[in-house]
Image: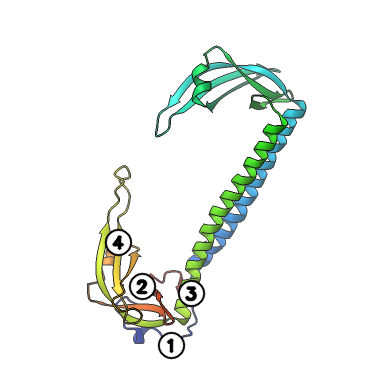
Amino acid sequence: METTINSKPAEILERPPRPARFTTGTQTARVTMVLLLLGTFGLLSWLGMRDMNELRALQAHGRMMGALITDKTVRHGKHDTYYLDYDFYVNQTFVTDRSSFDYGTWDNAVIGGSIPVTYLPANPHTYRLGVMTEDRIAGQGRAWFWTSIVALAILGLFTGALEWTFQEQLTLMRDGVAVAGFVMGREVIHSTDYRNRNARPKCYVTYTIPIGPAGRIYKVETPSWSLMYDLDVSQPLVVLCDPAQPARNRPLFLMTAVRV
């Protein structure tokens, strides 16, 4: 169904319930988020198991030696990061690497000195700095567990919030009452991060609807600058809302996730 932001409600929307459905792009986004959630779980599980297996192998079969410190550097930033370059040669295998250290260890390190490493004789590229103890393995297991929980929780919350937004649009498009709101103002907010010259300005439209608390103003972000300027102050604006909870409303032109 074709709609425009200047249309009157009676001219564009039949009475609810309407045969609303998600757009193809929305369906794709929903499936993508579920696959991303499952993929993240699978990837973290695989990385964690691989790391723990290597740690247990190093504890059971690893040998220790001193790796030669070849360089020490600092990467300056909001928080400085201290690096040591090192290498070791064993079983006709040359291993070279760089790792970050706390300032105390880095400051006391001397080029030409050594740091302890534990390696697998069958594959010297599988190694860890320091001594492999049971406490260290247990601590790494806890770290993987909580990293996975936090990562999945954050991604799950984002997925849930996105799904809630989609479902809210679907409910309003299907059952919402179309009313003629009025544009109260327009606003452009430019990014204050001058390091990001490509940051796009955020464009907002404020509007009111004739139901709910008198004088209540709602503010929404528009997808583009040009679309914001298609709306003139005091211009009628089609808004779909829940009559039982007028604060649950959304301008029709922002119903991008659903269609009728």
Q: Dot 1, crowdedness within 10 Å: few (<14), some or many (≥20)?
A: few
The kind of residue on which mark 1 rests is Arg
- Tell me where residue 240 appears, x and y as whole percent: 39, 78
Q: CA distance from mark 4 to mark 1?
A: 31 Å
Judge from the rendering whether residue 1 lies leftward or rightward of residue 86; answer left or right. left
Tell me which numbered mark, 4 or 1, is placed earlier along the sequence: 1
| Front position among marks 4 and 2 | 4
Residue indicated by mark 3: 170
Residue at point 22% right, 72% down?
A: 233
Judge from the rendering whether residue 152 lies leftward or rightward of residue 194; answer left or right. right
Asked if the residues shown at circle 1 and circle 2 are in contact, with their CB atoms under 8 angstroms apart, the answer is no
Hey, which residue is sitting farthest left in the picture? Answer: 233
Tell me which numbered mark, 1 or 2, is placed earlier along the sequence: 1
Residue at point 48% right, 74% down?
A: 170
Q: CA distance from mark 3 to mark 1?
A: 15 Å
The kind of residue on which mark 4 rests is Cys
Q: CA distance from mark 3 to mark 4?
A: 24 Å
For mark 4, give the secondary structure.
Answer: strand
Residue indicated by mark 2: 253
Judge from the rendering whether residue 200 lies leftward or rightward of residue 32; answer left or right. left
The kind of residue on which mark 3 rests is Leu
Residue at point 67% right, 40% down?
A: 141
For mark 2, give the secondary structure.
Answer: helix
Tell me which numbered mark, 3 or 1, is placed earlier along the sequence: 1
Instruction: Work out whether 201 lies above or below 186.
Output: above
The kind of residue on which mark 2 rests is Phe
